[in-house]
Amino acid sequence: MTRFPDRHLPLPAVERSGDGQRLPVGRPRKGEFVNGLLSLSRIIDDINERVGKTTMWLILIVVVISAGNAVVRYLLNESSNALLEIQWYLFSAVFLLMAGYVFKRNEHIRIDVVTGRMSARAQNWIDVFGIIFFLLPMVILTMTLSWPVFMNAWVSNETSPNPGGLVRWPVRLLMPIGFFLLLLQGISELIKRFAFLTGKGPNPLDKAKGPTPEELLAAEIKRQREIDEAAAVAGNDLTADRGPQGGRK
């Protein structure tokens, strides 16, 4: 005997995908998981972008402090250990807080003698291997080891042994924070590489189009040289026009 489904039982709700395929409600659509990961990657990128662009201003502050300290030392024969220490405090902040930003911009040092000749997919697979087996374990280990150092400095209110020196816990805190930002960026870069390898995103190794800093510097040097040459030619023409005795011909 053929049994028909009980008409009183609720039928499973369905919805149609873009190509008309019937999908049960509540079942994640194909690609939604990848899109969610890419959204997370964009949030991480935005965090490191903001931190990096803000930290850039510390370089100017370091230059001003260093120049001011040098001027005071030579003119007034006075100096301050606090001003000396704040320079390497800020330098540490620049180095550690911008590590994730540099990774995000793909501006860190690479040795592409071999991998530069490989395909884009091979380069991304190499990055995936390096991020998973080298970058992430190193970052997690460094965070784990540096946190007790910061806590010890915080609890003991560690201060520089130099007269007039600064407290040490702020600079100790930079280590776990900087490596945490690098950890986040490593996760973001891993997502972007998997997205590229699965055809869901662009190649993350492609740098933004435009001249490099070296090319901009070379162009500025060339422009300045052309200005100097034009000024020299104009000066020679003016001298020749006035004649040997300074009067005009």
Image (cartoon, rainbow, N blue to C red):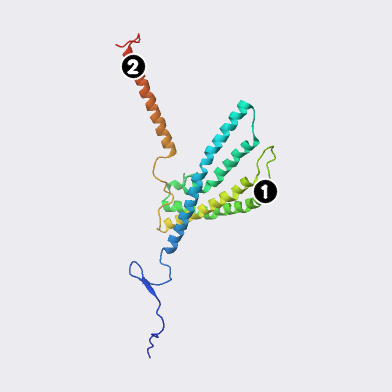
Disc 1 element: helix
Q: Position of residue 32 (x, y in %)?
A: 42, 63
Q: Which quadrant of the rendered structure holds the C terminus? A: top left
Q: Position of residue 241 (x, y in %)?
A: 31, 14
Residue 110 visible in rendering: no
Q: Position of residue 248 (x, y in %)?
A: 31, 11
Q: Residue placed at 61% from the left, 48% from the top?
A: 173
Q: Is residue 73 above or below residue 122?
A: above
Residue 228 visible in rendering: yes
In this rendered view, identify the residue nearer to me: 34 or 61.
61
Q: Residue placed at 37% from the left, 24% from the top?
A: 229
Q: Amino acid at mark 1?
A: Ala
Q: Residue placed at 67% from the left, 48% from the top?
A: 153
Marks 1 and 2, how far apart in space?
A: 70 Å
Q: Residue placed at 34% from the left, 16% from the top?
A: 238
Q: Which quadrant of the rendered structure holds the N terminus? A: bottom left
Q: Which labelled disc corresponds to residue 153?
A: 1
Q: Quadrant of residue 221?
A: top left
Callout 2: few (<14), some (14-19), or many (20+) C-alpha neighbours within 10 Å? few
| Among the two numbered marks 1 and 2 on one chain, the one whose residue lies closer to the N terminus | 1
In this rendered view, identify the residue nearer to me: 163 or 244.
163
Q: Position of residue 45 (x, y in %)?
A: 47, 52
Disc 2 element: helix
Q: Which labelled disc corresponds to residue 238?
A: 2
Residue furthest to the front:
76
Callout 1: few (<14), some (14-19), or many (20+) C-alpha neighbours within 10 Å? some
Q: Amino acid at mark 2?
A: Leu
Q: Is residue 210 above or below residue 218?
A: below
